[in-house]
Image (cartoon, helix red, strand yellow):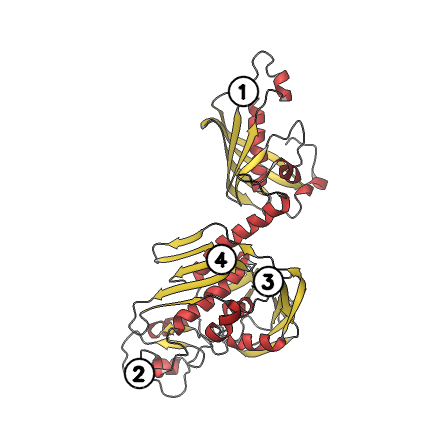
Amino acid sequence: MLVQQRTISNKVSVSGVGLHTGCESTITFLPAPENHGIVFRRTDVGGKPEIPALADYVVDVSRGTTLGIGDVKVHTVEHVLAAVAGLEIDNVMIELDAPEPPVGDGSSKPFVDVLLKAGFTVQDAPKDYLIIDQTVEFLNEKKDVQMVALPLDDFRVTIMIDYKNPALGSQHTGLFSLEDEFVNEFSSARTFCFLKEVEMLRENGLIRGGNLDNAIVIVDDEMEAKELKRLATKLGINGSVILGSTGILNDRTLRYKNEPARHKLLDLLGDLALVGAPMKAQILAARPGHPHNVEFARKIRKLYQQKKIVKKYQFTKTEGVIFDNEAIKRILPHRYPFLLVDKIVEFKIDERVVGVKNVTTNEPFFQGHFPAKPIMPGVLIIEAMAQTGGVLLLNGMENADGKLVYFMSLNNVKFRKPVVPGDQLIMQVEMASRRNKIATMAGKAFVDGALVAEAEMTAAIVDVNNSTAEGK
């Protein structure tokens, strides 16, 4: 696998019609600097707005993957992204003068051809691989879809499809080397749809640029010649249209016996580019499709963001510890005698965090609470939970050093048992809701498995420069 980031060496373009919108468009690929990533730019819109190719910006997955910010959208990006990811390009600016890239022949090959012509420039920065070191699974039982990412010091994809259609049957395929197989074995696999879907898709405003030159139509229903002719006229298809005998409309020849399966792998490759980093993983997918691909990509992207956060603050890897005391001091502004978290042992970005506070007899508050019978003040247990919860707020904070977290409200506060010297306080905090800079968290504190305190905490994230002297 490549080690250094790379971009293209020259500007290249492709023109044509968009598959779903039917708009004439030109897509232009331009070199981009290190750590730029893959970004789309709409040159036909005022201000030339840019949309990063990330799962965060997916706004629609009906018959394709659409990115958007506000009213600006880029439709059907998966074939373009498959070309970029398949050629292991890390940084590129992609300009479009219309809402959708040209469909070409329904595969990624037109984009691959011009990108190969552009050539590649190796950059100084290393690739930021997401190394999958734990199983990541997506399951939709209703649709019988299962996708999983497994640890592997390489990148491989295996998929299986089964549409219960005689023309297709069950198909599977696998990609084991991007460098050796992508261009010749997968990039030219074309998109496909079923005959009984075609009219419905058109009536729903889709496939306005589709024709028999840029899509494979699978015959899944008997149709009289008169009805077939009516459909062809409605779709603007010139020339004869026959059901044929191969299960493919007009008996078109497939480029590969399992071309539909290969195209599904191509789509998955493009959608996984939305993770925002190349991966080292074994990807297994049964019956993938854009809605599920994107949900899977979002799940993996969350793991990527979590790993970036951990790497930013935790300099030494320690078994069983996510953030040690030194890392916590890089995250939280609190210091002795008010830093009440010793380590973080579990961290799921935007979901859950578990912290540990070792309560020693040397705690300064025991001198007055109470000298004859030392008990940890309940408000400090809540504070320890809140500090633990502060780690959950890392996502979306570019500069944790410049932020403070202020209490806005505490609800359903309950103290179950006293906490005394020698106890180890385990704080479990889960995100209940988050909107902009306001977060609500549910916290529980345990000692030896017994619940000692709980509370619902609402807090505001404020800039240090804009903070006031009001209570935390």
Residue 238, compared with residue 320, is above or below; it is below
Q: Quick one: label 2 or label 1, which is nearer the N terminus?
A: 2
Q: Which secondary structure lies at badge 2?
A: loop
Question: x, y percentage for residue 415?
Answer: 49, 24
Residue at mark 2: 244
**Cα distance, mark 2 to mark 1?**
81 Å
**Cα distance, mark 4 to mark 3?**
27 Å
Q: Residue 281 has which mark? A: 4
Indicate left or right for 328 with 347 as reference: right
Residue at mark 3: 51
Discs 4, 1 touching: Cβ within 8 Å: no
On the image, which quarter does residue 318 sit in? Answer: top right
Discs 4, 2 touching: Cβ within 8 Å: no
Residue at 57% of width from left, 16% of height from top? 374
Question: x, y percentage for residue 116?
Answer: 58, 76
Residue at mark 1: 420
User: Which amino acid, mark 3?
Assistant: Ile
Residue at 67% of width from left, 31% of height from top? 335
Q: Which secondary structure lies at badge 3?
A: strand
Q: Quick one: label 4 or label 1, which is nearer the N terminus?
A: 4
Question: x, y percentage for residue 407?
Answer: 60, 34
> Which of 141/114 is in front?
114
Of labels 3 and 2, the one closer to you: 2
Q: Tell me the crowding category of disc 3: few under 14, some 14 to 19, or many 20 or more residues within 10 angstroms, Cα based.
A: many
**Cα distance, mark 1 to mark 3?**
53 Å
Indicate left or right for 195 with 125 as reference: left
